[in-house]
Image (cartoon, helix red, strand yellow):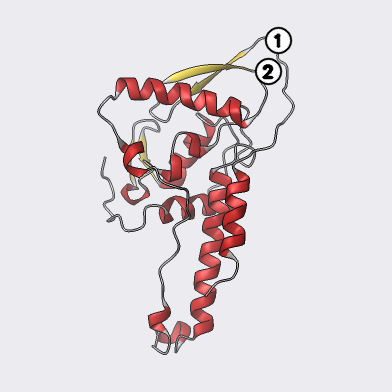
Amino acid sequence: MRAFPAVITGAVVLALGVGVLQPRARGGEQLEVKLCDNKTTTSVAADAPRTRDTGQAVANSLMDQWREANPNSDWVAEEKATHAVVEPADNSALVGQGQGATYGLVTKEDVLVWQNETYKMVIEGSLIFHSGDRLKSEIAVSCDMCHPHAANTHPETYPKFQPQLGRVALLRDMINWCIEHPVRGQVLAPDSAEMRALEAFITAQRKGTPLDYGKR
């Protein structure tokens, strides 16, 4: 039983309307923006307004090119649905059972804390994932613009070799690569609260998908 999800989930919806920031004029300079495939690019005026509409236009330009080059891919149609943060596993069946020296007998309070604290972190990750502002994007691009509902992120396949990085990468390495390039934001410290929350959200949204590390 949890009282806060409805309130916090409402915050997720509100987070989709990123606030308007003042443009920073740079004399007609164009910024190149690169998609996660490290091939598809577009450009945006450096002094364009930093609004969600501007960011969405950049993301749409990139994704339109990608879809034209990959006409048989339907991952968006398959995975797009009304936004909802996937809830953590229900551990209520463990109440009264032993969990070794760490917990002893599991109580209802244990189960509630495990569930609530996990869900709160995933919600925080969702808020960051949907906000160019939280990602400190120069062009108001957020993760969800190219990955609706964390589609096509495949956390269950990491670690794996990533051509963009030229090495085997963890999920957090690819998150930072995307923040640096399509988002044009500020990379996160690997063990920062923001990175941990993003990893938690992305992993949660793939609940039920078998772990298959190294899969392309």
Q: Amino acid at mark 1?
A: Gly
Identify the image quadrant of residue 71: top left
Q: Is residue 130 left or right of residue 19?
A: left
Q: Position of residue 19 (x, y in %)?
A: 69, 37
Q: Position of residue 132 (x, y in %)?
A: 60, 36
Neighbourhood count class around disc 2 (C-alpha, 10 Å): few under 14, some 14–19, many 20 upward:
some
Give the alpha-carbon distance from disc 2 to disc 1, as whole Å: 8 Å
Q: Is residue 66 above or below residue 95?
A: above
For disc 2, the marked residue is 47
Q: Residue at x 64, y 36 (%)?
A: 136
Q: Amino acid at mark 2?
A: Asp
The reply to whether the C-beta atoms of the residues labelled 2 and 1 are less than 8 Å apart is: yes
Which of the two residues, 89 or 38, is positioned nearer the viewer here? 89
Q: Position of residue 181 (x, y in %)?
A: 51, 29
Q: Is residue 167 above or below residue 45?
A: below
Judge whether residue 116 can be spotted in this image. yes
Q: Residue at x 70, y 14 (%)?
A: 26
Q: Is residue 194 left or right of residue 199?
A: right
